[in-house]
Amino acid sequence: MKSRQVIFTPEARHDLFGIYEWISSKASLQVAISYIERLETYCLGFDIASERGHRRDDVSPGLRIVGFERRVTIAFVADENQVTILRLFYGGQNWEDKLQ
């Protein structure tokens, strides 16, 4: 297996911050930090297992979608050298419309 660099787009970083803000307002700062750390670790694991998830070429060429803990939909693309986390959608957001 080839190792690829994992990067987050500015939009994905913004999504992480939004998820953190929402969880911290509903639970606590510690719960939010813990959740974001798990989510980031999961995404960084795409360096080796880059071809996981479901291909959604019907939405965008090369797009892959995978879930995280039944609450987040992760949209990403992978090429020979890199995995790009495009967006992170929390709690059932309509990700298809936002990615088209």
Image (cartoon, grey):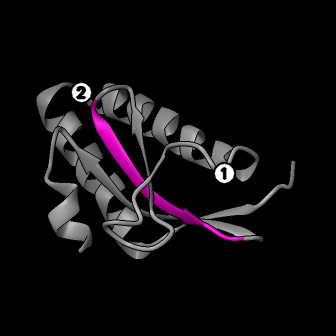
Residue 30 left/right relative to 45: left
Could you tell me the amino acid type at mark 1?
Ser
Which is more foreground, mark 1 or mark 2?
1
Residue 8 percent location from the top left of the image: 51, 65
3D distance between C-alphas at marks 1 and 2: 32 Å
Q: Residues within 10 Å of mark 2 (few under 14, many from 20)?
A: few
**Quadrant containing the C terminus in the rendered view:** bottom left
Rate crowding at label 1 as few (under 14), some (14 to 19) or many (20 or more) other CA atoms within 10 Å: many
Q: For this view, does 80 lie left or right of residue 9?
A: right
The residue lying furthest to the right in this view is 1
Amino acid identity at mark 2:
Ser
- Judge whether 60 appears above or below 27 on screen: below
Rendered image: mark on residue 28: 2
Quadrant hosting residue 32: top left
In the visual, does 88 lie left or right of 48? left
Tell me the residue that label 1 is attached to.
Answer: 50
- Label 1: which secondary element: loop
| Residue range corresponding to the magenta coloring | 71-79
Q: Residue at left 17%, top 42%?
A: 22
Viewer-proximal residue among 35 and 80: 80
Q: Is residue 96 above or below residue 81?
A: above
What residue appears at the point 33 percent right and 66 percent down from the top-left corner?
58
The residue at 83%/55% (across/down) is 3
Q: Position of residue 47 (x, y in %)?
A: 72, 52
Assign a secondary structure to mark 2.
loop
